[in-house]
Image (cartoon, helix red, strand yellow):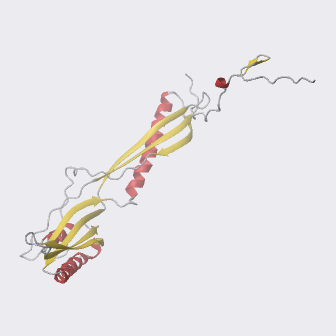
Amino acid sequence: MTSHPRKPATGDTVGRMTLHPQERTEPTGPALPYGTADAPRIAVRGEAHLEVDPEIARIGITVSARGKDRRSALDDLTRRNNAVLDLVKSYGQAVERIETGALSITPELTRHGRGERIRTYHGAVRLTAHLTDFTALGELTTRLADLDLTRVDGPWWELRPDSPTRRHARQQAVREAVQRAREYAEALGTTLDALVEIADIGAEGPQPLPPAPGMRMRSMAGYGAAAPDEAPPLDLEPERQHVYAQLNARFTMKPPKL
């Protein structure tokens, strides 16, 4: 009978090596990109804060109407809505665009009596006007608010989504990060060597704050004098817009002599 050598079981000693399952090591993940003695790394944050005038003023307009039946309420709402549109469009290029949001016709039921009986109908149309000429804003807002069953909300001051101010803020944040890194390197008696990474942690949108002192801007009636029975134009004051940008930047520098 031929004997076969027994295979070593887990935990047996083979030569000078002992196999233990609990001592088996798994491969670890990639090492973090820390600097080395030959290429020290600097990590800094760049920040920017710009304060500028708004580019757009946005107002909300709600036109209402009522009638004893659905058709009369709808006709009244159509007439009032057309009057508002004609008024807004009469300001020409001062109004960049006007948009219709929602339309509603709602029945109002009687509070007393048996059964459901409709007492009247209420209608509403919501519009939004975007103006770029702030000299016309006060006059238009006043004339809209002077119309029957018309509500005006705003203005809300904004920058355009593609405003150059946002680009300038990001560029300034980059320059600030480079300058900060250079100052750290100079403190060690060396200079920057290479850019490793720029991580954009977001350019925040404009944060409305109270207008700065001395920035009062009067709205002038640039589209003809108001009639004697009309209210004088509102004196509206634009809010300064605050734009923020932040980023992280990493550089390598030449080895300093410590």
Where residue 200 appears, as percent x and y from the top left, is 46, 47
- Quarter of the figure that contains the N terminus: top right
The answer to whether 98 appears left or right of 235 in the picture is right
Q: Residue at x 25, y 60 (%)?
A: 156
Where residue 175 appears, as percent x and y from the top left, is 45, 44
Residue farthest toward the left in the current orientation of the protein: 229
The answer to whether 161 appears left or right of 117 in the picture is right
Residue in front for this viewpoint, 142 or 181: 142
176 lies above or below 155: above
Q: Residue at x 45, y 41 (%)?
A: 177
Can residue 136 be seen by looking at this rendering? no
Where residue 242 appears, as percent x and y from the top left, is 31, 51
Residue farthest toward the top in the current orientation of the protein: 16
Total number of numbered discs in the rendering: 0
Q: Residue at x 44, y 44 (%)?
A: 247
Can residue 77 be seen by looking at this rendering? yes
Residue farthest toward the right in the current orientation of the protein: 1
Residue in front for this viewpoint, 116 or 228: 116
Residue in front for this viewpoint, 49 or 182: 49
Quarter-of-image position of residue 237: bottom left
Quarter-of-image position of residue 100: bottom left
Q: Residue at x 23, y 66 (%)?
A: 60
- Quarter of the figure that contains the C terminus: top right
Residue farthest toward the front in the current orientation of the protein: 1
Quarter-of-image position of residue 72: bottom left
Where residue 199 appears, as percent x and y from the top left, is 49, 44
